[in-house]
Structures are given as C-alpha cells and as structure tokens.
Image (tube, rainbow, N blue to C red):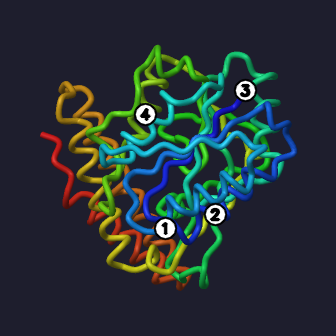
C-alpha cells in the first residue's frame, strides 16, 4: 500500500486540483491512501479539502490539522498517520500523472534494495519561462528531469520534495525530518530533504530517480521574481548553517570545499553564457551563488 502525503499551507488555489488528480488514479482504491496535512491554513484550504473528501468518498482521503508550524512538522505528522509500506510526498501545487500510484508500486516491487525515490517534476509556468532560467537553477522552482531512464542518485544529487518517496521503515531506522530545518509559514528556509537524504547516503542506502513517477508542478509568477529567488538563496545559506552547526570539523571542511567548487563552476558557467550572449542566465547564476554565501556561516 502507498500512502501519499500532501502537506498544505494556504493553497486554496491549487489543492482542489491536486486532490482531483490523486482521486483519478489507475491503481485500485485499496492500493493507496491520501494523507492531507494542513499546517494551519488561514484561507479556504480546509473547506476545499473537506469538500473533496465528501465528493470522492470512495477514495481513502484523510485530513489532519498540524498545529506545530513548519513543513518538517507536517511531513512527520504525515508519516505517523500513514498506514502504507511506501510513503510518497508531493507538494500541494503538484498534479500527479494518472499512473502515479501504479508506477510507485511497480518500481518498489521490482527494486527490493531501493529505499527511496525521486520522480520527474515538470515545471508548469503560469506565465512564461524567464530568460534567466537555466538548467542549473531549475531546482529553485522544484523541477527535476534527469532523462527517461531509471538511475541512481550519485554524489551530491538528491530527489526534490515535490515528488519523493520512501519505504516506511526508513523513518524508524534513520529518523524523521529535522524540525529545525524546512519552511515555516511563508519563510523560505529549506534543507530538510537534503538532510535526510544525506543520512541515507552516509549509510550507503540506494536512492533512485524514477521518471515514470511523474508530477506537474505549478510555478506562479511571484516565484520567479528577483526578490523571491534572493530569499530562496539566502534560505539555502541559512539552512546549511543550521544543518552544520553541530557537525564536526570534517563535515564543515567538506562544505567549504564544496562551496569553493560551486563558486568556481559558477564563474565558468557565467563565462560560457557571456560568450554565447545569454547574459541574464549568467548574471542570475552569479547572484544566486553570492546570495547563498552571504548567509552561509560554517566556522
């Protein structure tokens, strides 16, 4: 059984459509449940959720209110409320493919050694794709496309939270999401997904990219503003600082080396975009890396 966890906060514009897609699955109703975790929404999110639960009474929808503010609290609540052997997380503005649940089941049935997956996330821009958007900044809008073949996440590559899943025993063995990390309300912190995947990778657990487990992810205009991207970048720096605060010298030194490499790679990419007359892409890459470093406190 698959438990699909949808953590939501003030998304009355999208949550209804999100639940529509989760109802319209090719998988049997008994093969999955949908756990909705509302993190104190102040708009019509709760009303719409209950309307959809009534409308789709033959689908196993369950609604819960999480009073502790924060995305990690909501995800952890979803884990505790889930009955499935597989726990899948999607965003409240992500719309799943009709074979979403079926493909999750098929993948884990045929890959007994894999403990976690990250699926394909296709961005859907409400307006138009900005000129400054490059493949290197797509994770900022929670987009992920590593091709059409299943492959292992290697090195520093990880799934994205808008479409990821785990065997449930992962959480009993390796722990839940760190509540010091992740978004709280409208703040743009993060790092909760990365931190749990680092735990798994440190223990040599297999994490796979599975393109058949696919969602479409809405990218509203406000998420493409300079102010929003700057907030995201600073949130990355602040979250990494929190994550590393209780780590030893080796982990901190590794982070310094990683950031040094990223700075060098950013300048190389900037030069490439400059020479190919794609100035806006190069400039945004430089800005993003600067904004991250400005909030990164390691030592």
Q: Nearer the viewer, mark 2 or mark 4?
A: 2
Q: Are the residues flagged by discs 4 and 1 in contact, CB closer than 8 Å?
A: no
Residue at the spot of label 1: 44
* Residue named by callout 2: 16
Disc with the residue nearer the chain's start (3 vs 2): 3
**Left of 35 or right of it: where is 9?**
left
What residue lies at 65% left-to-right and 22% top-to-bottom? 85
Q: Position of residue 213 (x, y in %)?
A: 74, 44
Task: Identify the secondary structure beneath mark 2.
Answer: helix
Relative height, residue 284 to residue 122 (above, below): below
3 vs 1, front mark: 1
Q: CB under 8 Å between callouts 3 and 1?
A: no
| Distance (Cα) linking label 2 and label 1 | 10 Å
Residue in front for this viewpoint, 37 or 73: 37
Image-quadrant location for residue 226: bottom left
Viewer-nearest of discs 3 and 2: 2
How busy is the neighbourhood of tag 3: few (under 14 within 10 Å), some, or many (20 plus)?
some
Neighbours of disc 1 within 10 Å: few (<14), some (14-19), many (20+):
few
Q: Quadrant of residue 106?
A: top right
The mark closer to the camera, 2 or 1, is 1
Q: Residue at x 75, y 22 (%)?
A: 111
Give whichever of 137, 107 is nearer the camera.
107
Label 2 close to label 4 by CB (< 8 Å): no
Mark 4 — residue? 76
- C-alpha gap between disc 3 and disc 2: 23 Å
Query: Which numbered marker is on residue 1?
Result: 3
Q: Residue at x 58, y 40 (%)?
A: 35
The residues tagged by marks 2 and 4 sit, at their Cα atoms, a distance apart of 23 Å
Q: Are marks 2 and 1 in contact (CB under 8 Å)?
A: no
Q: Pick whichever of labels 3 and 1 is earlier in the sequence.
A: 3
The quadrant of the image that shows the C terminus is: top left
Of marks 4 and 3, which one's residue comes earlier in the chain? 3
């Amino acid at each position: 059984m698959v438990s699909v966890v949808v953590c939501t906060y003030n998304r009355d514009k999208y949550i209804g459509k999100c639940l529509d897609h989760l109802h319209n699955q090719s998988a049997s109703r008994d093969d999955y449940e949908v756990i909705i975790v509302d993190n104190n929404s102040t708009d019509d999110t709760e009303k719409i959720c209950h309307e959809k639960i009534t409308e789709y009474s033959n689908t196993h929808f369950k609604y819960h209110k999480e009073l502790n503010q924060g995305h990690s609290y909501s995800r952890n609540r979803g884990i505790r409320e889930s009955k499935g052997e597989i726990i899948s997380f999607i965003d409240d503005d992500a719309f799943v493919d009709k074979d979403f649940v079926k493909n999750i089941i098929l993948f884990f049935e045929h890959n007994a050694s894999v403990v976690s997956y990250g699926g394909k996330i296709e961005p859907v821009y409400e307006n138009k794709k900005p000129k400054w958007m490059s493949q290197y900044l797509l994770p900022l809008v929670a987009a992920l496309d590593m091709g059409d073949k299943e492959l292992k996440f290697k090195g520093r590559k990880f799934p994205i939270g808008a479409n990821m899943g785990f065997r449930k025993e992962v959480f009993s063995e390796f722990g839940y999401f760190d509540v010091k990390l992740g978004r709280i309300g409208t703040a743009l912190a993060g790092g909760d997904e990365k931190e749990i995947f680092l735990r798994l990778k440190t223990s040599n657990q297999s994490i796979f990219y599975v393109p058949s487990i696919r969602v479409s992810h809405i990218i509203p205009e406000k998420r493409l503003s300079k102010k929003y991207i700057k907030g995201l970048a600073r949130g990355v720096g602040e979250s990494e600082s929190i994550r590393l605060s209780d780590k030893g010298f080796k982990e901190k030194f590794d982070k310094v080396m990683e950031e040094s490499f990223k700075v060098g790679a950013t300048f190389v990419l900037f030069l490439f975009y400059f020479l190919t007359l794609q100035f806006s892409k190069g400039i945004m890459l430089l800005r993003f890396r600067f904004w991250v470093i400005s909030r990164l406190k390691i030592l």
